[in-house]
Amino acid sequence: QKEVEQNSGPLSVPEGAIASLNCTYSDRGSQSFFWYRQYSGKSPELIMSIYSNGDKEDGRFTAQLNKASQYVSLLIRDSQPSDSATYLCAVKRGQGAQKLVFGQGTRLTINP
Amino acid sequence: EAGVAQSPRYKIIEKRQSVAFWCNPISGHATLYWYQQILGQGPKLLIQFQNNGVVDDSQLPKDRFSAERLKGVDSTLKIQPAKLEDSAVYLCASSLDPVPYEQYFGPGTRLTVT
């Protein structure tokens, strides 16, 4: 079992709809969770971080965390073609561990 | 605020040759990371520095890879000798502190080993 799992996609969503990206993780002691966006040929860009159960909203982006289910998601409202990219979920493991573990990423395409 | 700088942006070498990458983190960021990203995969941490010291190098292939961060600022990552499977993008990232782990990436170096 991978430490951080994402559906590699591609996920295709019509413009203006809500895109939902999901991520599960295996280490129950994980404490910090991040979503990065990576355009083709570019480096990852941090878009959201979440540390406690519940929802965190930032503009059109909402991160959701459920530690009991070991599940974190990213919702993108009013999807735009410029949101087309690969979205990487990253998890900081439990106490004493300092590194981030990345999932393989989900490729999202927004269709005009 | 200037971002993370890396050079070169692209490098093509033959197998068994050596190569070096350079990274300059965001000013004031104590923690520096080197990642390897193979096409279609997420970044994999190779080595993490806190100031001058190594925090984690558990996934660094030490028989061929080496890294240093002199004076706690910029860093170099070296591969010697390179193998075909080293073809990847090498990403440098930095963070203000190990906590809360918000890392900022440089543009990366795309390495092709032929």
Image: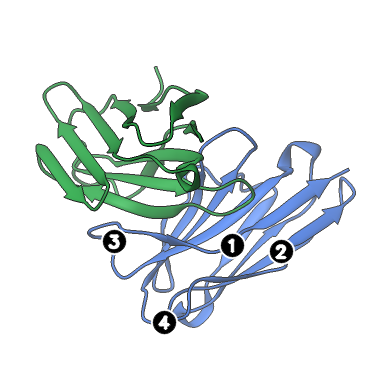
Chain colours: A green, B blue
The type of residue carrying mark 1 is: Pro
Residue for point 61% across, 59% down? B108
B4 displayed left or right of A68: right
**Nearer the N terminus, badge 2 or badge 3?**
2
Tag 2 residue:
B9
**Nearer the N terminus, badge 4 or badge 3?**
4
What crowding class fits label 1: few (fewer than 14 Cα within 10 Å), some (14-19), or many (20 or more)?
many
- CA distance for labels 2 and 3: 26 Å
Asked if badge 1 and badge 3 are on a common chain, one would say yes
Q: Secondary structure at mark 2?
A: loop
Residue B68's spot in the image, x, y percent?
56, 68
Mark 1 vs 2: CB contact within 8 A: yes
**Nearer the N terminus, badge 4 or badge 1?**
4
**Nearer the N terminus, badge 1 or badge 2?**
2
The quadrant in which residue A45 appears is bottom left
- CA distance for labels 2 and 4: 21 Å
Q: Which mark is residue B98?
A: 3
Residue for point 45% across, 78% down? B72
Residue for point 24% across, 32% down? A72
Q: Foreground mark, 4 or 3?
A: 4
Tag 1 residue:
B107
**Nearer the N terminus, badge 1 or badge 3?**
3
Q: Which mark is residue B31?
A: none
Tag 4 residue:
B1
B9 displayed left or right of A24: right
Q: Foreground mark, 1 or 3?
A: 1
- CA distance for labels 1 and 2: 8 Å
Pick the front one: A22 or B14: A22
**Nearer the N terminus, badge 2 or badge 4?**
4
- CA distance for labels 4 and 1: 15 Å
